[in-house]
Structure formats: C-alpha cells, structure tokens
C-alpha cells in the first residue's frame, strides 16, 4: 500500500486488537444517540448537521476516557467515514461536470489548486507542516467537513492529529455558515446575473448544503448553477485524494509498497466507480436519494465520533493560528471565485 507507509489506512485495522461485535456496541450507541440529537436540532432549527454533530461530540468528549467506548468510536470515525465518502459519489455525474463548460471548469480546477496552495503556504508561515496545510486548504477548496474527514483519513493520524482535524472542522463550520450569509450580499452588491452569482457561490462556499442554500436564496437560476459548480468541486475530491496518496508514497521514499507503484485508497476508487455508475443514469432515484441520506448520516456520525475522541487539551493549546490558516484559504477562494465570476464567466 504505497499511500499507507505508516499503517494509517490498512494497518490500523490489522494491527488493532480484535473485538467481538459486542465490543463495538457501547461506542456506536453513544455516537448514534449524539448524531440523532444533532439531526433533530438541524431539522428543527435550520443549523448545519455537521456543525451540530461537531458541537454535540465535543460536549460528550469526557466519554473518551471510558475505554469500553474506544472500539465503537474508532469504527465510527474510520470505517463509517470511508463508506460515507464512497456514497458521496451519488451526488455527481460526469455529465454535470462537462455541462459546466471548459472555461468555468478550468476556473474551478484552478481555484481548488490555488486555494490548497494558499493553505499550505499559510500553514508553513504559522509554523505547521505541509500535512496540516493540505488538510486545511483542501477542506476549504473542495467540500468542507467531508473533505476534511477524507483528507485526514488519507494523511493518517501520524501526520494529522485528532486535535488538528477537530480544529479544522470547527473553523470550516463557522466560516461556511458565515459565507452562506455574506456572499449573496456581495453578489447583490455587484448586481450579478444568475450565472455569475451561481458560479461565485458554488465556487467559494465550503459545504454543499450552505452553497446550495446561498444559491437558492439569490434565485432559482443561481441555485441551479451553484449546485453544478459545487458538485464539480466535490467531484475533485477523489483526484485530490489520489494525488495526496501518491505524494505520500514519494515523500516517504521507498518502502515495499512503493515498488509496486503508488496506491490509491479503496474509498477513492469506490467514489469514482459510484460516480461513473451514476453518470449512466442506471441508479433509480429512490436508491440515489437513500444513498445520499446514508452518506450524510455516515459522515455526521464520523464527525460526532471524531469530536468525542479529540484531545481538548491540545485544542486549547493550539490557539488561533490554525483558524487563521483556514481564514486565509477562505479569503483566497472567495477572491479567486469573485474575480472569475466578474471577468470570465458569462
């Protein structure tokens, strides 16, 4: 496994103590109850599910001291996350990406690449390593919390800690919610057409739900464009994960897996396969809808489990610098999307 030089993707399963299914139940029950509570609050108060899952998980952080919960928490934060990433593939089709047009598609790719680059540079400027820059910049550039969880899984816990991941999730949730409220006002100030506004909102806002909410709050036309642009960014998650995995193999230098060529995590391949199947329109709408809901539930469950497992002492010690990295990447993404919308789109 070329991307698994430290046993992060596969070794954790094989090296971890074996548990009977009963050993997973306590932790999974706690995570399920927390996620259901987050879903209730999200449905009744219009708050993003990811944010609620994160806050409830942090409130339950004291439970991480109970070793009886460890197997279930680890399973939820790793295995359920990976399957959730696979199911995200039902959100996109390759036809949607092609329909965006070559100019807009190139702009989206450049915005994602430059935003990740800004995150890496900002991380180094504030004393963090490249891995944290990839995590923070990639989360802003692609699809918020979902990308953060996927990138953290690919990078592995020896490169990005639970505390760093939780900080990124906190920053992403706060800034995505703020962007949903502020960016449509910018679009109105520039008197943008539906096409330009939809591109701006879809290309700059972090999470899918907030991007679509901002788009449809502007107009139905802008909402449709924002959905296509945003889902194009989501589609870039798989190639970005593949590049990161291959980069880890190169940076690690050698190793048994490297001799066989760079590996790609199985959940990345699954994402591609499901998106390809969905592109042919063979997945019935009811199945696709169920898969989307399952993906959202799995990702929210993984966020809850990650927050419960996070070492709060390290969170408090980190200070504002990690959030500044996310803020810089957010401003770069917004500036690039605004420039593209004004100068190149339409």
Image (cartoon, helix red, strand yellow):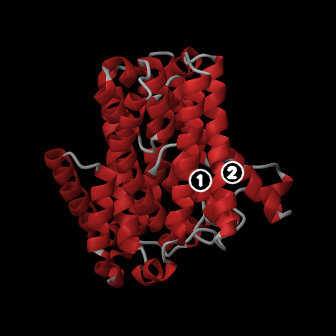
Name the residue nearer the viewer: 70 or 310: 310
Q: Quadrant of the N terminus?
A: bottom right
Point 43% across, 18% down: residue = 193
- Give neighbour class at mark 1: few <14, some 14-19, many 20+ (Cα, 10 Å): many
Point 64% across, 49% down: residue = 116
Q: Secondary structure at mark 2?
A: helix
Q: Say whether residue 283 is visible.
A: no
Q: Say whether residue 5 is visible.
A: yes
In the rendered structure, find residue 339 and report the number of the disc placed on it: none
Q: Earlier in the sequence, mark 1 or mark 2?
A: 2
Q: Where residue 240 sits: x, y (%)?
A: 64, 44
Tell me the residue that label 2 is attached to.
Answer: 117
Point 80% across, 61% down: residue = 251
Tell me the residue that label 1 is attached to.
Answer: 137
Q: Where residue 218 sits: x, y (%)?
A: 32, 27
Q: Is residue 34 left or right of residue 149?
A: left
Q: Is residue 117 left or right of residue 256?
A: left
C-alpha gap between disc 1 and disc 2: 7 Å
Name the residue nearer the viewer: 246 or 207: 207
Q: Secondary structure at mark 1?
A: helix
Q: Quadrant of the C terminus?
A: top right
Q: Is residue 5 above or below residue 227?
A: below
- Give neighbour class at mark 2: few <14, some 14-19, many 20+ (Cα, 10 Å): many
Q: Quadrant of residue 99?
A: top right
Q: Where residue 33 sits: x, y (%)?
A: 21, 62
Q: Where residue 78 sits: x, y (%)?
A: 47, 60
Q: Is residue 88 left or right of residue 345?
A: left
Q: Quadrant of residue 276?
A: top right
Marks 1,2: beta carbons within 8 A: yes
User: As drawn, which residue projects farthest toward the left?
Assistant: 44
């Amino acid at each position: 496994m070329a991307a698994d030089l430290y046993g992060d993707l596969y070794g954790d399963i094989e090296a971890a103590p074996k548990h009977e299914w009963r050993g997973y139940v306590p932790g999974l029950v706690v995570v399920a109850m927390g996620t259901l509570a987050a879903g209730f609050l999200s449905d009744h108060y219009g708050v993003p599910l990811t944010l609620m899952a994160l806050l409830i998980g942090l409130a339950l952080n004291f439970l991480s001291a109970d070793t009886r919960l460890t197997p279930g928490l680890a399973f939820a934060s790793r295995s359920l996350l990976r399957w959730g990433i696979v199911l995200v593939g039902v959100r996109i089709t390759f036809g949607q990406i092609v329909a965006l047009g070559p100019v807009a598609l190139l702009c989206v790719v450049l915005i994602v690449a430059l935003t990740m680059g800004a995150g890496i540079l900002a991380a180094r400027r504030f004393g963090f390593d490249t891995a944290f820059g990839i995590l923070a910049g990639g989360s802003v550039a692609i699809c918020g919390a979902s990308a953060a969880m996927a990138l953290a899984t690919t990078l592995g816990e020896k490169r990005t800690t639970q505390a760093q991941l939780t900080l990124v999730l906190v920053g992403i949730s706060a800034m995505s919610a703020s962007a949903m409220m502020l960016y449509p006002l910018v679009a109105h100030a520039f008197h943008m057409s539906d096409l330009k506004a939809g591109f701006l909102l879809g290309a700059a806002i972090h999470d899918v739900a907030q991007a679509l909410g901002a788009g449809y709050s502007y107009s139905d036309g802008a909402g449709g464009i924002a959905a296509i642009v945003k889902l194009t960014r989501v589609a870039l998650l798989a190639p970005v994960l593949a590049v990161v995995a291959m980069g880890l193999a190169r940076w690690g230098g050698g190793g048994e897996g490297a001799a066989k060529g760079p590996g790609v995590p199985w959940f990345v391949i699954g994402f591609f396969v499901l998106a390809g199947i969905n592109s042919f329109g063979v997945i019935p709408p009811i199945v696709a809808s169920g898969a989307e809901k399952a993906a959202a539930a799995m990702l929210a469950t993984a966020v809850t489990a990650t927050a419960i497992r996070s070492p709060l002492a390290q969170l408090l010690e980190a200070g504002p610098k990690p959030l500044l990295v996310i803020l810089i990447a957010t401003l770069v993404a917004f500036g690039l999307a605004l420039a593209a919308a004004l100068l190149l789109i339409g």
